Amino acid sequence: VRAQDLIVEQPTVGLSDPAVEAARVIGSQHRPAVVVVDDGGRPVTVLPASQVLRFLVPGYIQEDPSLVAVYDERAADELAGKLAGRTVGDLVPRGDRQKLPVVDPDATILECAAVMASLRSPVLVVREGDRTLGVVTASRLLEALFG
Amino acid sequence: VRAQDLIVEQPTVGLSDPAVEAARVIGSQHRPAVVVVDDGGRPVTVLPASQVLRFLVPGYIQEDPSLVAVYDERAADELAGKLAGRTVGDLVPRGDRQKLPVVDPDATILECAAVMASLRSPVLVVREGDRTLGVVTASRLLEALFG
């Protein structure tokens, strides 16, 4: 079994797309993450749903979620408004872009597991040259090993 | 909108169940994670698929995935064998058990987002007293905000 046998199709969003597009793709398709590509279609990073939430929630509330009590119901609207005028690239800190979880199509299960475990990523990009073929998810890998 | 409106059903595994059971539940249902409960059914922690992989892959390979080349195809079988005789509790380091991402059923969207963002968790346990009602996923939350 190789990475190419475990691929599931995965929508991508571009670095210069509106940030709200990434949130919509993740939300409407119930994905744990979305693959971010550059203008040439090359995968740049994996953007997890929790990272989008981190962008929305003020830092002092992330540090102490009990402070959320000072907010009221209307705050949810302000939350969503935070993506206005932002791009997908704004959601992905430049420092994080080095850590692309990626393998070639002929990677073994062990290789896939090693890269995922190492980067604690729920999703692994399968890349052939500059082209994104799709992703392997951690759950799909466990299915191949223990199913 | 409150946490109870966003709940999706989520299978649980017990701390003393065989470790392979957690891998099978995640794999067969294509979940990003599984909720771990104690003998009384109380949620203890969320076990992500990538954490199971971390248990399987030798530490020196996680530190340098290129070393995987020294392994051969048979290694995948040895990988799966690592769960033999282990319990779910063995997969969850005791130090991690403090960080249960949990909210009450009447938590607001902002509160859910804050806890998820803070713990970088893809899944949030909704608990009423000692009972696990289900989970809210980060993608479901983004759907509620941007759908």
Image: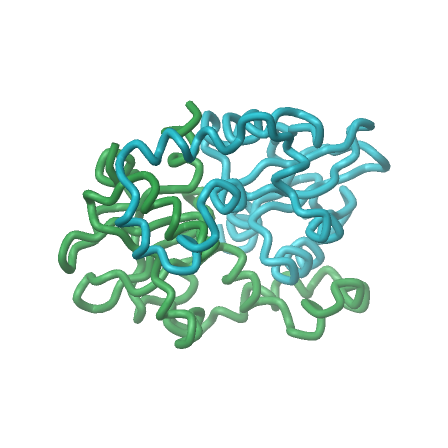
Chain colours: A cyan, B green
Identity of the residue drawn at 69% across and 43% down = A45
B48 to the left or right of B43: right
Can you tell which quarter of the image residue B56 is in?
bottom right
Please provide percent x and percent y for residue A42. Answer: 79, 34
Residue at the farthest front position: A70
Nearest to the observer: residue B64 or residue A14? A14
Can you tell which quarter of the image residue B60 is in?
bottom right
Residue at the farthest left position: B129
Please provide percent x and percent y for residue A56. Answer: 48, 40
Identity of the residue drawn at 64% across and 33% down = A88
Report whether residue A13 is seen. Answer: yes
Nearest to the observer: residue A22 or residue B48? A22
Report whether residue B85 is seen. Answer: no
Please provide percent x and percent y for residue A109. Answer: 66, 54
Identity of the residue drawn at 31% across and 59% down = B13
Please provide percent x and percent y for residue B94. Answer: 39, 76
Identity of the residue drawn at 71% across and 70% down = B63
Q: How many marks?
A: 0
B111 to the left or right of B54: left
Looking at the image, residue B41 lies above or below residue A132: below
